[in-house]
């Protein structure tokens, strides 16, 4: 198996996620689901066409629902299933020294304000 990496291959591992993100691209401001995330990038699931090679600003909860992370990146791949983003700066605190991911929020675990 060749060890050469193509431009669309990940440089760092990703973990499965289910987090609603707000993102701003040339096409507008939208909200869709993060399907996977790593320290240097993510994939957002959407049926909406998003052009490649454009900047993107993302806002989403990562460790706590009440605390939003804002990060900038570039759309590096787009398909009818969604688009991949490479971050301008890696997300710190997402993985430990051993490379294991810390626990992140998931929409299925969000409690409504009425629940106790």
Image: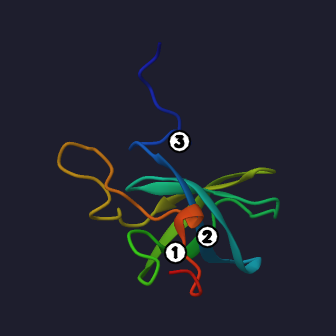
Q: Is residue 81 left or right of residue 65?
A: right
Q: Is residue 20 left or right of residue 99?
A: right
> Which residue is painted at 44% across and 26% down in the image?
4
> Which residue is painted at 52% across and 75% down in the image?
60
Q: Earlier in the sequence, mark 1 or mark 3?
A: 3
When the figure is inspected, residue 89 is found, relative to residue 68, above or below; the finding is above
Residue 33's x, y, as percent? 65, 63
When the figure is inspected, residue 60 is found, relative to residue 37, above or below; the finding is below
Residue 85's x, y, as percent? 56, 59
Residue 54's x, y, as percent? 63, 68
Q: Is residue 27 left or right of residue 115?
A: right
> Which residue is painted at 56% across and 42% down in the image?
8
Tags 2 and 1 touching, CB below 8 Å: yes
Which of the 4 image quadrants contains residue 44? bottom right
Q: Which residue bears the numbered disc 2?
A: 20
Instruction: Between label 1 and label 3, give the one nearer the viewer.
Output: 1
Q: Which residue bears the numbered disc 3?
A: 7
């Amino acid at each position: 198996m060749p060890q050469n990496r193509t431009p669309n291959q990940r440089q760092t591992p990703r973990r499965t996620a289910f987090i609603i993100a707000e993102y701003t691209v040339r096409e507008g401001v939208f909200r869709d689901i993060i399907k996977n995330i790593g320290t240097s990038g993510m994939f957002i699931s959407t049926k909406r066409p998003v052009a490649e090679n454009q900047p993107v600003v993302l806002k989403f909860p990562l460790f706590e629902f009440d605390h939003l992370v804002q990060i900038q990146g570039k759309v590096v791949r787009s398909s009818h299933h969604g688009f991949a983003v490479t971050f301008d700066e890696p997300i710190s605190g997402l993985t430990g020294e051993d490379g294991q991911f810390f626990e992140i929020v998931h929409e299925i675990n969000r409690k409504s304000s009425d629940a106790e």
